[in-house]
Image (cartoon, rainbow, N blue to C red):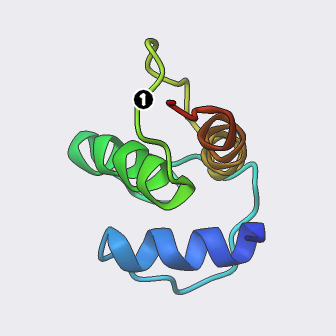
């Protein structure tokens, strides 16, 4: 999934209006307008679409759209190695 596809799905899932083009460096709170509940939902949404069955032990540091997309990519990699016999 590309960055733009991820952002489109994220905005749809969080019921945010996408009125402009966003960059990876855009701040989730100031530029995008997320509140604290939506930030939590972002993490859950990202883990779900990445197919991650068990979240990491530490809460990821996500401040920008790029951070969120990077977390998606790492969660995707973790989900592929998270095979339980």
Element carrying mark 1: loop
- Image quadrant containing the N terminus: bottom right
Q: Residue at x 32, y 68 (%)?
A: 14
Check disc 1: other Cα within 10 Å, few if <14, some if 14-19, many if 20+: some
Where residue 19 sits in the image (x, y, percent)? 53, 87
Q: On the picture, is 12 further left or further right than 18?
A: left
In the image, 30 versus 42, the foreground residue is 42
Place of residue 24 in the rendered image (x, y in percent of width and height, measured from the top left): 75, 54
Q: Quadrant of residue 33?
A: bottom left
Q: Position of residue 72 (x, y in %)?
A: 62, 48
Q: Is residue 29 above or below residue 24?
A: above
Residue drawn at x 75%, y 62% is 23
On the image, numbered disc 1 is attached to which residue? 55
Residue 67 place in picture, x, y as percent: 67, 40
Is 9 placed left or right of 54 in the picture?
A: right
Q: Residue furthest left?
A: 37
| Residue sitting at x 60%, y 46% | 68
Whether residue 33 is situated above or below residue 77 in the rendered picture? below
């Amino acid at each position: 999934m590309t960055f733009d596809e991820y952002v489109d799905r994220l905005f749809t899932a969080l019921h945010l209006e996408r009125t402009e083009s966003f960059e990876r460096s855009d701040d989730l709170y100031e530029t995008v307008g997320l509140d604290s509940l939506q930030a939590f939902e972002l993490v859950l949404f990202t883990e779900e679409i990445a197919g991650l069955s068990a979240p990491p032990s530490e809460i990821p540091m996500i401040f920008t759209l790029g951070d969120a997309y990077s977390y998606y990519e790492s969660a995707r990699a973790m989900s592929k190695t998270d095979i339980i016999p």
